Image (spheres, rainbow, N blue to C red):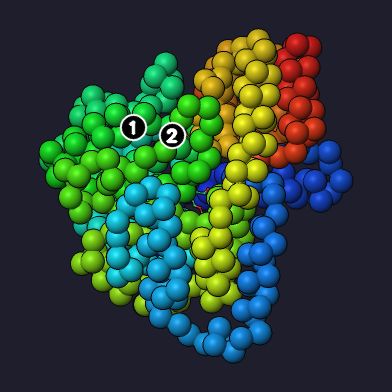
């Protein structure tokens, strides 16, 4: 019998992080006292000056029409200026494509670069979208496990072990979703030199660049690794920095020939991104970084609280994250133990037990290529964060 769905899409996994978040929100809507640690988005509103720019744009008929596929010229210029300001990256506007969020930029980058069978090294634990996106583009995702004892920072040795003559690209994300790991500047340069030496292109996902804490700093690989030449694609967006996840504006930056192909692809798939959102993004990028500075203070406080509370639970161990807004604790010590009258044999089952018994939603490590862990977002109110973790601690203490 002919299948009703293509083989390609039959083989595509759904986004586990969006699913956990949707389930938590649905239970909450039914009146359940659910505390969601699944969200991958700031719990703050978009700053008013950005919203005002969008509201104004709605009344300007210019924005009611199609605009250039690659993005509004003002926004591409703002992305050029922002890249220079924030990471010292020198690019020109014809190297910038505005996309429907960073996720769309990731998909477009793989679609633009990969041929069937090309291998892409993806450090694990990985953001759940990367392997699926590689798969959709005809490539082969190759997870490269990073060491928990090394703070989940991938090393040149890890990458070299996974390299074959089919390796075409490396995904490099720092700060990392889901672990919160931030690569040291020297390691960024070393990994960049390794990629250059083996002619491996690097997709640098810089979406969490401004969310670093303590002594951690973000550096852009193309800036610290001149040897890489133009063999890189930078992906970024306004979602995490300006609390704009719902506005759907991201971008990719790469060499002009790569960009020509990417713009061509976008011209046949989405055309331009919503003009209203693009105008909002112009206001965001040409404004200052005070909103993210304020969010960083709150996230840093919650990061410390969450790490401390998790490590106080018998059977849980959490490396202190240095960036983004996630903790990634090891929960293997809880497997096989009776909790709330049930014993879990995997982190996925354990996550189910937590949702059903104490109404807290976490994303199991299975979604990130590493069973035995949980991802908990600390982008939620301080009181909810503490209450949710107290429920977890009480459940474990009660056995
Ligand atoms: C590592 C990483 N890259 C890219 C994105 C894409 O963000 P958006 O599509 O909302 O711009 C996300 C969102 O969760 C992310 O975690």
Q: How many C-alpha atoms fall within 10 Å of the one at disc 2: few (<14), some, or many (≥20)?
A: some
Q: Is residue 305 above or below residue 83?
A: above
Disc 2 vs disc 1: Cβ atoms closer than 8 Å?
Answer: yes
Q: Quadrant of residue 47?
A: bottom right
Identify the disc placed on residue 185.
Answer: 1
Above or below: residue 325 compared with residue 289: above
Question: Callout 2: helix, strand or loop?
Answer: loop
In this rendering, the answer to whether 32 lies above or below 291 is: above
Residue 158 on image: x %, y %: 27, 26
**390 displayed left or right of 156:** right
> Can the viewer see residue 356 in this picture?
no
Instruction: Tell me the quadrant of the picture where the C terminus can be found.
Output: top right
Q: Which residue is mark 2?
A: 217
x, y percentage for residue 200? 19, 44
- Split into 4 quadrants, where in the image is the N terminus? bottom left
Identify which residue is drawn at 68% across, 75% down: 55
Q: Residue 16 or 345: which is nearer the viewer?
A: 16
Relative placement, left or right, of 185 versus 74 is: left
Q: How far apart are the alpha carbons under marks 2 and 1? A: 8 Å
> Which quadrant of the figure has residue 174?
top left
């Amino acid at each position: 019998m002919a299948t009703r769905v293509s083989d390609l899409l039959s083989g595509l996994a759904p986004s586990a992080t969006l699913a956990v978040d949707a389930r938590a929100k649905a239970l909450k809507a039914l009146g359940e006292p659910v505390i969601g640690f699944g969200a991958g988005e700031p719990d703050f509103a978009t700053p008013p000056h950005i919203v005002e720019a969008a509201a104004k744009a709605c009344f300007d008929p210019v924005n009611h029409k199609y605009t250039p596929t690659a993005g509004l010229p003002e926004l591409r210029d703002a992305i050029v200026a922002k890249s220079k300001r924030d990471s010292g990256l020198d690019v020109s506007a014809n190297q910038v494509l505005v996309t429907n969020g960073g996720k769309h930029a990731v998909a477009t980058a793989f679609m633009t670069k990969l041929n069937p069978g090309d291998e892409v090294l993806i450090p694990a634990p990985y953001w759940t979208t990367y392997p699926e996106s590689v798969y959709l583009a005809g490539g082969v995702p190759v997870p490269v496990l990073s060491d928990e004892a090394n703070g989940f920072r991938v090393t040149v040795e890890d990458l070299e072990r996974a390299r074959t003559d089919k390796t075409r690209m490396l995904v490099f994300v720092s700060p990392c979703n889901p672990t919160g790991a931030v690569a040291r500047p020297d390691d960024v340069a070393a990994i960049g030199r390794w990629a250059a030496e083996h002619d491996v292109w690097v997709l640098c996902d810089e979406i969490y660049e401004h969310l670093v804490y303590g002594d951690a700093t973000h550096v852009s690989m193309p800036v610290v690794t001149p040897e890489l030449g133009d063999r890189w694609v930078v992906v970024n967006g306004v979602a995490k920095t300006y609390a704009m996840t719902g506005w759907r504006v991201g971008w990719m930056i790469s060499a002009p020939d790569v960009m020509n192909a990417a713009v061509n692809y976008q011209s046949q798939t989405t055309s331009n991104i919503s003009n209203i959102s693009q105008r909002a993004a112009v206001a965001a990028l040409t404004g200052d970084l005070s909103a993210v500075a304020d969010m960083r203070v709150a996230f840093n406080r919650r990061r410390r609280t969450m790490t401390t509370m998790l490590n106080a639970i018998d059977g849980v161990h959490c490396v202190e994250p240095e960036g983004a807004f996630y903790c990634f604790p090891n929960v293997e010590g809880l497997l096989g133990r009776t909790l709330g009258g049930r014993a879990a044999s995997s982190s996925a089952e354990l996550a189910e037990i937590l949702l059903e018994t104490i109404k807290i939603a976490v994303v199991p490590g299975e979604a990130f290529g590493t069973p035995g862990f949980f991802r908990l977002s600390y982008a939620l109110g301080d009181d909810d964060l503490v209450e949710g973790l107290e429920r977890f601690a009480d459940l474990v203490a009660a056995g």
